[in-house]
Image (cartoon, rainbow, N blue to C red):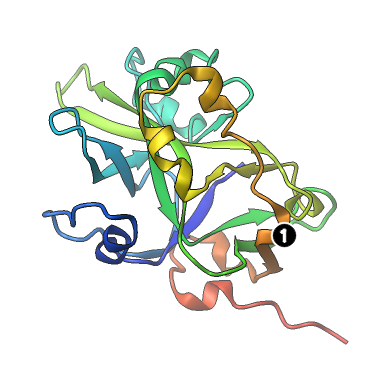
Amino acid sequence: MCGRYRRTTREEELARRWSIPIPVQSDLPISWNVTPSTEVLAIRVRRDTKAQSFDWLRWGLIPYWSKDKRIAYSTINARAETIDTTPAFRRAFQKRRCLIPADGFYEWRKTRPPKVPFHISLRNETPFCFAGVWEAWQDPETQEWLRSCSIITTEANDLIAQIHDRMPVILREADFPIWLGETGEADLKSLLRPYPSEEMRMWEISSRVNSPVNNDSAIIDPVPLTS
């Protein structure tokens, strides 16, 4: 799964890197400890211009048919294997896909006790994008619209399998237009695969990351080896 990540590259730098218009809204602050139910930076295709643009989405997808937004607590992730059949994600996968920029993510060891956190990033330390889906939901009480998203997960690669059986789907930059474009579902699902282990790195970090209050660069400091 993916329940925490960091986005420490600013919007303007990402816009230049991926040739996306610099957003006119105020910059969403970077975060070393992005948590579910908060606003996250995402890349979508605008309906009016058909161009890629940055947007803010709440992490935890609320299906358009839901009567209650509390469902978002269980929809921060969507499984790649069933995203085209699960009612909560099926329509979003068909029509509303997005990219979610990140610089690294956190996972807690599940393969054996104790449960300790690890930081995972690309070996070359460049920003990347998770594959995501989004949905628009209207609150039946206030009539206000809320846009929310989910990060897609797949089976773990050999590196992450040492601590957990799942990992978020990381897309290659060459696949961004495919994911955001008008593509057949079969072609899209072929993109939802584990990122190569040899292009990633991982190390144990302190339990400070467990609390959203801790949001600083020291979170990813490696835990010192004990003799």
Percent x, y of residue 110: 77, 48
**Residue at far front of view:** 174
Q: Please identify the quadrant where the N terminus is shown.
A: top right
Residue, disc 1: 198
Percent x, y of residue 45: 26, 35
> Which amino acid type is marked by label 1?
Glu
- What residue sits 35% from the left and 26% below the top? 96
In this picture, residue 149 sits left or right of residue 194: left
In this picture, residue 83 sits left or right of residue 162: left
Q: Please identify the quadrant where the C terminus is shown.
A: bottom right
Q: Is residue 20 visible?
A: yes
Percent x, y of residue 217: 47, 76
Instruction: Out of 187 and 161, give the one closest to the viewer.
Output: 187
Q: Which image quadrant for residue 194?
A: top right
Instruction: Out of 204 and 67, give the one closest to the viewer.
Output: 204
- What residue sits 15% from the left and 59% below the top? 26
Q: Mark 1: which secondary structure? A: helix
Image vertical order of residue 65 relative to residue 96, above or below: above
